[in-house]
Amino acid sequence: GNRGFRGGEWAYAMLAWEEGLRYLQYEPGADGAPDPAFDHGGAALVERDTQLAAALCCNMAAALLKTGEDRKAADFCCQALTFDPGNFKAIVRRAQALVNLGEYEVALQDVQRGLEIDPACKEAAALRRSIDAGVRRAQVRERELFAKMMG
């Protein structure tokens, strides 16, 4: 997936990462029924797989942002955050997707959370500026619409 992403082959990258997520969900058992005794190899492996799932979801979000599928990108970031609530990349990528969707209030919460984790993050600071500009544009449009309605 990473090689495809670096080469701009978004569909290939997403296919590879989705396959990785499917693999992580696999539970052995007879006739497709999960084996209740399967422990995924112990707590250490479950933790490793949880971090991997978060990374794969973040990667999917990055590719979806590249293809303009912002809602799906935000959804994958939410999935990543269920696996790893403090995942910085998921927080910032979800903020980017929400800015693209015009959902500035929620995006601002993510940006602020991201800047708490890494105050020097240039991407989060740039998103903050984009949010401020987007809010100002929305307020201007709102005033113009109100003026048309009243006049």
Image (cartoon, rainbow, N blue to C red):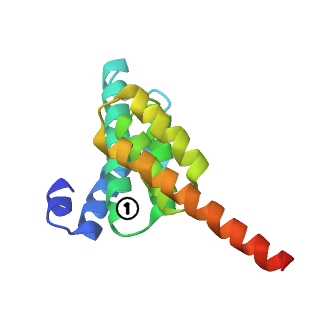
| Residue appearing at x 38%, y 62% in the figure | 64
12 to the left or right of 34: left
Q: Is residue 116 visible?
A: yes
Compared to residue 146, the image places residue 22 above or below, namely above
Compared to residue 106, the image places residue 11 above or below, namely below
User: Along the line of sight, which residue is nearer the eye, 107 or 67?
Assistant: 107
Which quadrant: the C terminus? bottom right
Residue 59 in the image, given as x and y percentages of width and height? 31, 51
Q: Amino acid at mark 1?
A: Leu
User: Along the line of sight, which residue is nearer the eye, 69 or 143?
Assistant: 143
Which quadrant: the N terminus? bottom left
How many marks do you count on the picture? 1
Residue 91 in the image, given as x and y percentages of width and height? 43, 40
User: Which quarter of the figure has residue 147?
Assistant: bottom right
User: Along the line of sight, which residue is nearer the eye, 109 or 28?
Assistant: 109
Q: Is residue 29 visible?
A: no
Compared to residue 116, the image places residue 20 above or below, namely below
User: Along the line of sight, which residue is nearer the eye, 24 or 1?
Assistant: 1
Residue 36 in the image, given as x and y percentages of width and height? 50, 30
| Residue appearing at x 44%, y 54% in the figure | 130
| Residue appearing at x 39%, y 34% in the figure | 87
61 to the left or right of 106: left
Local crowd size for mark 1, using a 10 Å CA cut-off: few (<14), some (14–19), many (≥20): many
| Residue appearing at x 32%, y 60% in the figure | 63
Extreme-front residue of the structure: 151
Extreme-right residue of the structure: 150
User: Which quarter of the figure has residue 150?
Assistant: bottom right
Residue 135 in the image, given as x and y percentages of width and height? 57, 56
Q: Which residue is mark 1?
A: 65
Say which element carries label 1: helix
